Image: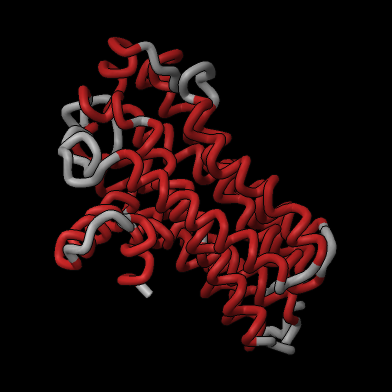
Amino acid sequence: MALMLAIMIEAVSFDNSLMLRKLNAIFSDIKLKHTIFALPFALSSAHIAFDGRYDFKTLALILICMFTARFAAMAFNRWLDRDIDTVNPRTKSRSIPSGTVAPKTMLGFVIFCCVVFVITTWFLNILAFALSPVALAVVLGYSYFKRFTSWSHLVLGLSLAIAPVGAWIAIRGEFNLLPMILAAAVVFWVAGFDIIYACQDIEFDLRIGLHSIPKRFGITGALAISLVFHILTIGLFLLFGYLAGCGIIYMGFIAVIAMILLVEHMVVTPKSLELIGVAFFTLNGFVSMLFYLAVLLDSYFHGGS
C-alpha cells in the first residue's frame, strides 16, 4: 500500500527508491507516533458505543478514518507552513524546507488522504458521510488559525476532539451527549499541552507575527491558562465517567491522570522550558493511554455502560 501511495504522489518518477525515501520523509514529518493523542479517545468512545457487541469491520473503518484524517491534517500543516518552517530553527529540517519533499508532493498526499477518508465514511453510515467535509474542514482549518487568533490552541483541541464523536457516529449513526462531553475534555486537554508546547516558540512568533497564548499573555500567564484548561479536563473526565456509569476503577485512573498533569505543570516552568519535550509527548501520551485503559478495565470489572 505504501508503494501504491508513493506512485500516486510521484507519478512522474520511476525511481522506486526515491519514492520510498520521500514517503518515509512524509511519514517522519507527520509523526505517526503522535496519533497516540487522539486514537485512545476514539477507541474509548467506540468501546462504549459498541456496548459489548463489537463489529470489527466498523472498527477497521473507524481506524482508517482516524489515520487518514490525521495524516491529511499534519501533511496540510507542513504544506501550508512551509515558508514559516524554513525560517524557524526548530522546524527548518522538516521535509519541505530541507528539500526532501516537494510542496506538490505533500499536497498530493493530503488530497489522497482526504479522498480515502470521505470514501471510507460512505461505508459507515449516511450521517458520517454527510459530516465528512465538516470534519476535514476542522482538521485542515486549524493550520490557518494561528495566523489571526491567539486561541488557535483550542481549535487544535477541537480537531482531535472530533475523534470520540466521530467514532460514536460511525457506530450509532447519531449524536449523543456522552461523546460530546469526552470531546470537550479532549479540547481542553490538547489546548492545555499545546499552550505549553508553544512556549518554546514565543520569540519566533513575536518576530514573524504569528499568534499564540504565550505571545499574548507571556509564558507565566500561558502556563496558568494551561493549568486551568487541565483542571477543566479532569472535571469533564469525571462527568463523563459519572454519566457513563463508570466505577471506582475508572475514577482511580482519572486520579492518576490528574497527578500526571500536575507533574507536567510542576516540570515545565518559565525557567525550565527545555523540559517541554518530556511534558509534551511522554506525559501526555500516558494520559491518553491511561484513559483508554480506564474505560476498558472499568467496563469489564465494574460493568459500566
Q: Which residue is more in the foreground, 233 or 117? A: 117
Q: Which residue is more in the foreground, 110 or 70? A: 110
Which residue lies at the image location 82% right of the left edge and 60% below the top edge?
Answer: 176
Q: Is residue 232 left or right of residue 264?
A: right
Which residue lies at the image location 72% right of the left edge and 85% below the top edge?
Answer: 303
Q: Is residue 180 left or right of residue 149?
A: right
**Could one spot residue 60 in this view of the protein?**
yes
Q: Is residue 41 left or right of residue 11?
A: right
In the rendered image, residue 33, in percent from the top left (x then y), is placed at 34, 61
Color scheme of the displayed model: secondary structure
In the rendered image, residue 144, in percent from the top left (x then y), is placed at 50, 27
Q: Is residue 60 above or below residue 96?
A: below
Give the quadrant of the C terminus: bottom right
Q: Quadrant of residue 62?
A: bottom right
Q: Is residue 73 above or below residue 253?
A: above
Which residue lies at the image location 27% right of the left edge and 59% below the top edge?
Answer: 23
Which residue lies at the image location 17% right of the left edge and 39% below the top edge?
Answer: 99
Q: Is residue 215 left or right of residue 177?
A: left
Q: Quadrant of residue 28?
A: bottom left
In the rendered image, residue 129, in percent from the top left (x then y), is placed at 74, 60
